[in-house]
Image (spheres, rainbow, N blue to C red):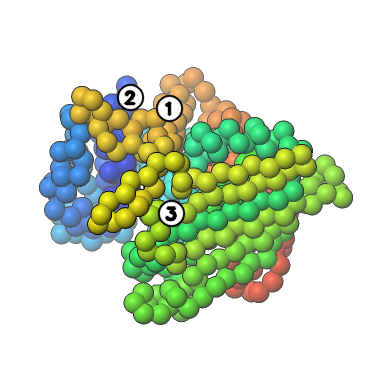
Amino acid sequence: MSIILLNLAVFIEQAVLESTPPDGLGQELLSLTRRQEVPRHPSLLEDKIGNVYKDMDVGFKSYPDDNTVDPDSYKKAIDDLAPGSAVVIIFTPNTTHHPIAKYALERKMHILVTKPATKPLEQHQELIALAQQNGVTCWVKQHKRYDPAYADAKLCARALGEFNLFQAWMSQPKSQLGTFRAWAGKDSDISYYLSSHHIDIHSWYIEGKSIPTLIASAATSIATSEPYNCVEETEDTITLMVDWQSIANPKHKGTAVYTSSWTAPLKAGIYSAQYFHYMGQTGEIRIDQAYRGYYVTEDASGKSAYNPFYMKYSPSETGHFDGQRGYGYVSIDKFVDAARSINAGASKASDHDGHGLPTIKNTVLTTAILNAGRISLDEKREVKIERDGENWKLV
């Protein structure tokens, strides 16, 4: 099985994945808008990966060729492989997910796309239909579902009776505004980028039990001021306030607050603050994913909190990659296993929808809430999410 990787970040992550290659995986293809997006190649990949881990192959075939700019280069990469012979992993700006995923699904390729799968709900539901029509699986890289604490808490939440309260906070430092200035406020917002994590977790915990209605609020001015100078539409912090109406009990309603920001302090000792508080009828759950009890203090940088449970970057005793147990790795590994199982005839694509995995079908409510939040901010109104046969609609 070949792997088509869209975006440098995916290539690096997949190169790590390939340190202990699963049977049946072969050539790696990397599609970029321009070949120069892999700077100083091969020295960059050699320095950051090849020279860090023993026996690590960082070679790849790129699309387009050197000194060429082509935003449609992914089509050539996909067309060069036989239908059903590859998996496509998409880590590109949010507005490009849908056309790339659609093109690959129509050519019977299994897809893993970073969150959010799409911005508009309609596009997400189109990808569900395309995956079903072509007998392939499409997953969203919601890696927090594989964090041992978050995964275990799902069972605990189910045992606490009707959902009552969910509060989630996720942030990144202001420096990210410089990193993402090219698209911040234009192609996407901080809610799509960060709140997609905890909205997915909460929707997963109460799956099939409640229907949401929401209104959104935002703070502004930091992102659009010096030294960041993002476009005027860029929000600093976005909060989605969601009422979840119980399906089983018309008298019961839960409330959720999902807040995300990219204007957090620069020297907080963490790359991303991320935690939630869940309360049910008979108990509550609190998880802080940023502070895992592992701290390093240095004279130059001060105190930092580390999270090796996402990815362990230090080599093994023999010098090989040793991050296979990290939930970041697992989120890709499980997708590749599913694709191989389907290709081997051991399972059907639809089988994986029933196992609590982040398939395109199982993550549709996350996109619905994010899309509703954007509409609420733009139109300054409450947005309802309703069933429309097998689909969802925003009202």
**Which numbered disc flags the more N-terminal residue, 2 or 1?**
2
Instruction: Say what amino acid the circle numbered 2 marks.
Output: Pro
- Residue 22, which numbered label? 2
Query: Is residue 106 among what the camera can see?
Result: no
Query: Which element is circle 3 on?
Result: loop
At 33% from the left and 46% from the top, the residue drawn is 296
Instruction: State the quadrant of the C terminus.
Output: bottom right
At 64% from the left and 74% from the top, the residue drawn is 379
Q: Which of marks 2 and 3 is in front?
A: 3
**Which numbered disc flags the more N-terminal residue, 3 or 1?**
3
Q: Where is residue 114 in the image (x, y as percent from the top left)?
A: 44, 48
Q: State the residue position of label 3.
A: 272
Q: 215 or 31: which is nearer to us?
A: 215
Q: State the residue position of label 1.
A: 337
At 43% from the left and 21% from the top, the residue drawn is 344
Disc 1 packing (10 Å; few <14; some 14–19; many ≥20):
few
Q: How far apart are marks 3 and 1 (CA)?
A: 29 Å
